C-alpha cells in the first residue's frame, strides 16, 4: 500500500513539475533588449547618475514575445549589490499599456512625458523616475538588473506614492512572464 501511495505521489509531483516547466517555456518567450545596453557589459556613461559623472538618462528599451493575456507591463531596475541589506532601486515604472513595446531613451524623466499612462514611483535617490548607476567608490562592480514584467491586469492598484516593495508585491501577484537585461558599473 505504501508503494502505491509513493507512486501516486511521484506521478503527481512529475505532473506538477511538467506544468511548471511548461509555464516557464511560454514565459521564456518574453525578451528585453536595448540599443545602448548589452547583457553583462558595462553601462554607458549616458545612463550613469549625475553624482558619478553621468548624464542620468534612462536607456532605450524594447521587448517582444509577451504571453497571451498580457494587459500591461511594469519595469523595475535594481542593484542587488548596493551595501544596504536590500539593494538599491533605480527605477520603478508600471501601468505601461499592453500595446507599448518600447521605452525611448529619457522615458525615466517625468517631464518628458514619454509614457503618460504609466506611473513612476520614487527611486532610492528619493525622486520619481530613473536614477542611474552610482555605487560607492571602491565597492567594486555592481549589477544593474532591468526586469520587465508582463502583467495580466491593466493597472496595478497603486499610485505614485507606492514603494518599490509594494509595486513588487503587486507585480508578483499579477505576473504572467518576466525578462531581464543585466549590466554592470563600478567606479
Image (spheres, helix red, strand yellow):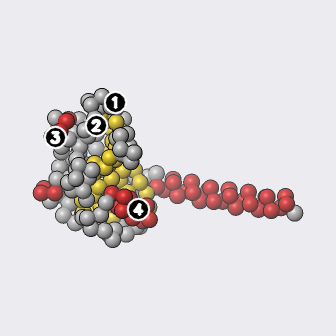
Q: Are marks 4 and 1 in contact (CB under 8 Å)?
A: no
Residue at x 25% of width, y 38% of height: 134
Q: Is residue 102 above or below residue 42?
A: below
**With 134 as the anchor, is 110 left or right in this view?**
left
Give 54 or 102, whichever is nearer the viewer.
54
Q: Is residue 53 above or below residue 29?
A: above
Q: Quadrant of the C terminus?
A: top left
Q: Are marks 2 and 1 in contact (CB under 8 Å)?
A: yes
Structural crowding at the residue carrying mark 1, measured as other residues with C-alpha within 10 Å and reported as few (<14), some (14–19) or many (≥20): few
* Alpha carbon distance from label 4 to label 2: 26 Å
Sequence-wise first label, 3 or 1: 3
Instruction: Give the residue at mark 1.
Output: 140
Structural crowding at the residue carrying mark 3, measured as other residues with C-alpha within 10 Å and reported as few (<14), some (14–19) or many (≥20): some
Residue at x 34% of width, y 68% of height: 156
Give 6 or 99, whichever is nearer the viewer.
6
* Alpha carbon distance from label 2 to label 1: 8 Å
Sequence-wise first label, 4 or 1: 1
Instruction: Give the residue at mark 2.
Output: 135
- Does residue 134 appear in the picture of this structure? yes
For label 3, the SS is: helix
Structural crowding at the residue carrying mark 4, measured as other residues with C-alpha within 10 Å and reported as few (<14), some (14–19) or many (≥20): few
Instruction: Give the residue at mark 4.
Output: 169
Which is more foreground, mark 4 or mark 2? 2
Sequence-wise first label, 4 or 3: 3
Amino acid at each position: 500500500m505504501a508503494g502505491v501511495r509513493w507512486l501516486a505521489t511521484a506521478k503527481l509531483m512529475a505532473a506538477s513539475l511538467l506544468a511548471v516547466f511548461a509555464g516557464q517555456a511560454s514565459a521564456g518567450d518574453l525578451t528585453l533588449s536595448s540599443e545602448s545596453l548589452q547583457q553583462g557589459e558595462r553601462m554607458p556613461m549616458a545612463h550613469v547618475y549625475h553624482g558619478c559623472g553621468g548624464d542620468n538618462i534612462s536607456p532605450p528599451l524594447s521587448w517582444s514575445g509577451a504571453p497571451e493575456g498580457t494587459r500591461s507591463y511594469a519595469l523595475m531596475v535594481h542593484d542587488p549589490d548596493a551595501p544596504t541589506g536590500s539593494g538599491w532601486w533605480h527605477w520603478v515604472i508600471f501601468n505601461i499599456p499592453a500595446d507599448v513595446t518600447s521605452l525611448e531613451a529619457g522615458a525615466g524623466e517625468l517631464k518628458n512625458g514619454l509614457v503618460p499612462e504609466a506611473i513612476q514611483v520614487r527611486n532610492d535617490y528619493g525622486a520619481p523616475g530613473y536614477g542611474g548607476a552610482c555605487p560607492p567608490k571602491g565597492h567594486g562592480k555592481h549589477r544593474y538588473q532591468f526586469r520587465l514584467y508582463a502583467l495580466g491586469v491593466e493597472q496595478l492598484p497603486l499610485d505614485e506614492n507606492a514603494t518599490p516593495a509594494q509595486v513588487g508585491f503587486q507585480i508578483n501577484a499579477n505576473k504572467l512572464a518576466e525578462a531581464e537585461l543585466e549590466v554592470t558599473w563600478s567606479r
